[in-house]
Image (tube, grey):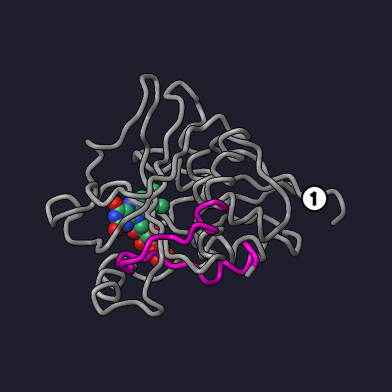
Amino acid sequence: MTITQAIEKRKSRRTYSDKPISPEHTALLRSRVDEYNQRSGLTIRLVEKGASAFAGIRKSYGMFKGVRSFFVMKGPAGDPHLKEKIGYYGELLVLEATALGLGTCWVGGTFDPSGIRRSSGEELVCVITVGPVPASETARERLIYKAIHRGTKTIDQLSMVTGTPPAWFQRGMKAVQKAPSTRNTQKVLFTYENGSLRASVPDTYKFDLVDLGIAKLHFSLAAKGRFEIGNGGSYIPPEKE
Ligand SMILES: Cc1cc2nc3c(=O)[nH]c(=O)nc-3n(C[C@H](O)[C@H](O)[C@H](O)COP(=O)(O)O)c2cc1C
C-alpha cells in the first residue's frame, strides 16, 4: 500500500492487540522519525513501552484499550510553526504506519502526559498511538466513532471558490475530507481566488494549527504540490501540470 492509498484506508483506532510492533516495522518507523526530525527541527520520539500514559479509565477516559506504543509529538517551544509541523510530519508517520497495516490515533487530550520525558525548551503538543490492531473495529470502537464523528463535511463546506480551479483542486479536497482533525471539527478552510489557493484555520483552539498541518499534507499528497508554511500559506502546484 502506498502513502496515498493509506489516506483512503486510515481511520482512528482506539483498541490495540496485545502484541508489540514487529522489529522490522519498528526499525522503519524509527528511521522515518529520524529523517523527519532532521528535516523539521522537531524532536519526535517513538515510545515502545508507554502503556502507563493510557492505563486506567482515569487517564484515557475509557477511550483507549491495549496501547503499548506511541509517537511523542514534541519540538522546540520557540518554533513559530511548531504545531503546523507537528501536524504535517505526524500525519506522514500516521500514513506510513497505516501502509504497514498498523492502527493509529492522534491524541491531544485523553492521555496522561506526566510520565512523558521532555527536555527544557521542548513543548509536548500531543501523542499518536500506534500498533497492531484487530482486523476490524471492535463494537466499542464503533460506538466511540459514532459519538465523535458526526459525518464528513462536503467539499463546498471545506472551501470557498471564486472562478474555476484546475483539476488538482478536487483531488486535493477529496484527500482533505479524509484527514483526521480534533473532534472531527474539520476547521481548515481552503480558499481559491485569482488563480491561487490558500489554507487557513481560525486558530482559536490549541490544536487548530495541528489540524492545518494535517490537512495541508493530505491535500499536497493527492494534488502532488506543496504548501508554503504558515496560517494562510499558498499552494504551490508541481512544475509540470
Ligand atoms: C490534533 C488531534 C487531537 C486529537 N485528540 C484526540 C483525543 O484526545 N482522544 C481521541 O479519542 N481522539 C482524538 N483525536 C482523533 C479525532 O477524534 C479523529 O481524528 C476524528 O474524530 C476523525 O475520525 P477519523 O480519524 O477516524 O477519521 C484527535 C485528532 C487530532 C487531529
Asked whether 95 or 27 is in front, the reply is 27
**Region rendered in magenta:** 2-28
Where residue 26 appears, as percent x and y from the top left, is: 50, 54
Task: Tell me which amino acid carries mark 1.
Answer: Pro
Where residue 116 appears, as percent x and y from the top left, is: 29, 37
Confirm whether residue 118 shows in the render: yes
Magenta-colored stretch includes residue 122: no
User: In which image quadrant can residue 164 be found?
Assistant: bottom right
Residue drawn at 62 percent across, 45 percent down: 198
Q: Secondary structure at mark 1?
A: loop
Q: Quadrant of the C terminus?
A: bottom right
Q: Residues within 10 Å of mark 1 (few under 14, many from 20)?
A: few
Residue drawn at 59 percent across, 40 percent down: 36
Image vertical order of residue 60 relative to residue 122, above or below: below
Q: Quadrant of the N terminus?
A: bottom right
Tally of numbered tags = 1
Instruction: Find disc 1 in the rendering and name its residue.
Output: 238
Image vertical order of residue 54 relative to residue 66, above or below: above
Where residue 197 appears, as percent x and y from the top left, is: 67, 48
Name the quarter showing ligand 1: bottom left
**Outermost residue toward the front?**
23
Magenta-colored stretch includes residue 11: yes
Image vertical order of residue 223 relative to residue 77, above or below: below
Where residue 118 appears, as percent x and y from the top left, is: 35, 29
Query: In the drawing, does residue 228 fall left or right of residue 156?
Result: right
Residue drawn at 38 percent across, 43 percent down: 207
Query: In the drawing, does residue 49 fall left or right of residue 78?
Result: left
